[in-house]
Image (cartoon, grey):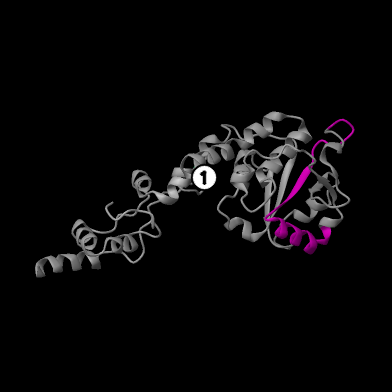
Amino acid sequence: MSEDFQEVWEDLVGIPADPPSMRELCENCTRPKLVCWCSYLPATPLVTKCCIVILQHPAEEKRCLRTVPMLSLGLAPGLCHVYKGKKFPQQRHTGLEDLMHAPNSVLLYPSPQSVDLSDLPKLASGGYDSYNLFLLDGTWPQAKAIYHSSPLLHSMKQVKLLTTGTSEYVIRTQPTEGCLSTLETAALALTILENREVIRETLLKPLKALCDFQLDHGAVTHQSKEYLIKTRTYPKLIGKRLSRLLNGVSPNAAESDASHSDKEVGPNQ
Ligand SMILES: [Zn+2]
């Protein structure tokens, strides 16, 4: 027994304080490879006449589902600019102030003076050759705070989307918001401005793929160790002997040591 005890002790000592990272990240989208959506990006990034300027609240970057990378990777280089901050422009926002002053820049923001985006003069038919479409990226309170802290935004031409075609993914992608994701908003606005439905279809593919994936697996990944083991995301940290001993003594002790939160996993796994 004392030999067994020694072996068990060695197993215990061998458990790393921090579980090793089991998730390989995609270099392109920086998401775990398992949930990478890069294969749904267009083979050739989309070339649009208009460009998107995203003013992003710093907290937005930390959210789980960020749709802006899908947009910036789906569009050709130079067509999606992202500036981060709580007010705009700041000194570090190179080129932003000029963009905000440009006559063909419009801000998508539902203020009392904003006009329907569809009513903007159409491209190249008496209107401009392109628009710079500004979007505020964050929750609605964050977007409002950005707007109120950025006086230059108030003097920009403001537009709103009056479409009733709300997202088919809205519940899944925006659990705390009753609005379109930034990707969907940008894709829809570009589609209207350029009158090309293919823009929306193309840009939304990664989001659709991600939503389908979450529907298929989302509930499972939160509950099932079996799934995590199959996909090699479940950290196996303890040896057989220790596992057996712990299972014999206290079925749940092994789980609470070896996993973060799998409370629903049965003791005999
Ligand atoms: Zn990827």
As for residue 125 lying within the magenta part, the answer is: yes
Q: Residue at x 73, y 57 (%)?
A: 143
In the figure, residue 170 lies in which quadrant?
Answer: top right
Q: Is residue 128 among the parts visible in the rendering?
A: no
Numbered circles on residues, count: 1
How far across and down, in percent of the image, does residue 117 sit?
Answer: 82, 40
Horizontal relation, residue 43 to residue 83: left or right: left
Camera-side residue of 140 and 49? 140
Give the residue drawn at x 69%, y 39%. 187
Residue 33 is situated, as x and y percent measured from the top left of the image, at 45, 44
Left or right: 129 with respect to 216? right
| Three-letter code for the amino acid on which mark 1 is drawn | Asn
Can residue 182 be seen in the rendering of this structure? yes
Q: Does ligand 1 reach within 8 Å of label 1's beta carbon?
A: yes
Q: 97 or 18, which is in the foreground?
A: 18
- Image position, residue 163 (x, y; %): 77, 38
Task: Say above or below: 228 vs 46.
Answer: below
Q: Is residue 239 left or right of residue 199?
A: left
Residues drawn in magenta: 124-152
Taking depth in this image into account, of 170 and 21 the one nearest to the observer is 170
- Relative vertical location of residue 232 with respect to residue 141 in this rendering, above or below: above
User: Which quarter shows the N terminus?
Assistant: bottom left
- In the picture of the structure, the residue carrying the numbered disc 1 is 28
- Membership of 151 in magenta stretch: yes
Q: Circle 1: is it few (<14), some (14-19), or many (20+) Cα within 10 Å?
A: few
